[in-house]
Image (spheres, rainbow, N blue to C red):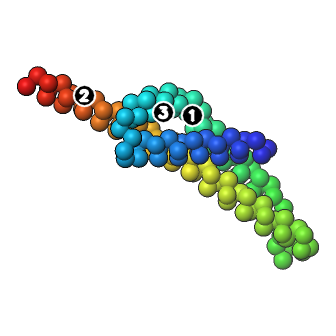
Amino acid sequence: MALEWIVLGTAAGAEAIMILLLTMPGLDGLRHGLLLAVHTALQPLLAVIPFCPFLLMDIYWKYETRPTCEHGSHACTATEHLRHQKSIMKSQRNALLIAATLLFYWLLFAVTSLVARLEQLNQRTNKLDRQD
């Protein structure tokens, strides 16, 4: 089950790096190539969108079927209590990873659209300057 979280973490990392490269100042010469590479990568990264709700449902199912360590109904040993706490921490970490992945994809899509539009407008202004 850890492979799916590795894939999601890798996708989130790749999205974050692409956002940084697109928004970093001083890379004007590479901007067109970066834009093409990111635009091409957006479609395969779209597979993350349906994958994230599936993983959220998995977290929810594990949360609902997890044995609880409550003092009233069932006394837990120290090991069971630590295992319970560790499971809760992993679920919270994984939910945060899902949210970050979806946020990074949305930001990457928005930034790519804005940079493409900005490049088109720059080309138009250069064409108008040459005509004058």
**Which residue in the structure is indicated by mark 2?**
123
* Residue mark closest to the camera, 3 vs 1: 3
Say which quarter of the image contains residue 82. bottom right
2 left or right of 26?
right
Tell me the amino acid under the disc marked 3: Val
**Which residue in the structure is indicated by mark 1?**
45
Disc 2 vs disc 1: Cβ atoms closer than 8 Å? no
As helix, strand or loop, the secondary structure at mark 1 comes to: helix
- Image quadrant containing the N terminus: top right
**Residue that appears at 24% across and 32% down:** 121
Earlier residue among tags 3 and 1: 3
Q: Position of residue 97 (x, y in %)?
A: 62, 52
**Residue that appears at 18% across and 24% down:** 127
Tell me the crowding category of disc 1: few under 14, some 14 to 19, or many 20 or more residues within 10 angstroms, Cα based.
some
Q: Position of residue 56 (x, y in %)?
A: 66, 48
Q: Is residue 98 visible?
A: yes
As helix, strand or loop, the secondary structure at mark 2 comes to: helix
Q: Measured along the vertical axis of the image, is residue 89 above or below residue 4? A: below
**Residue that appears at 48% across and 33% down:** 38
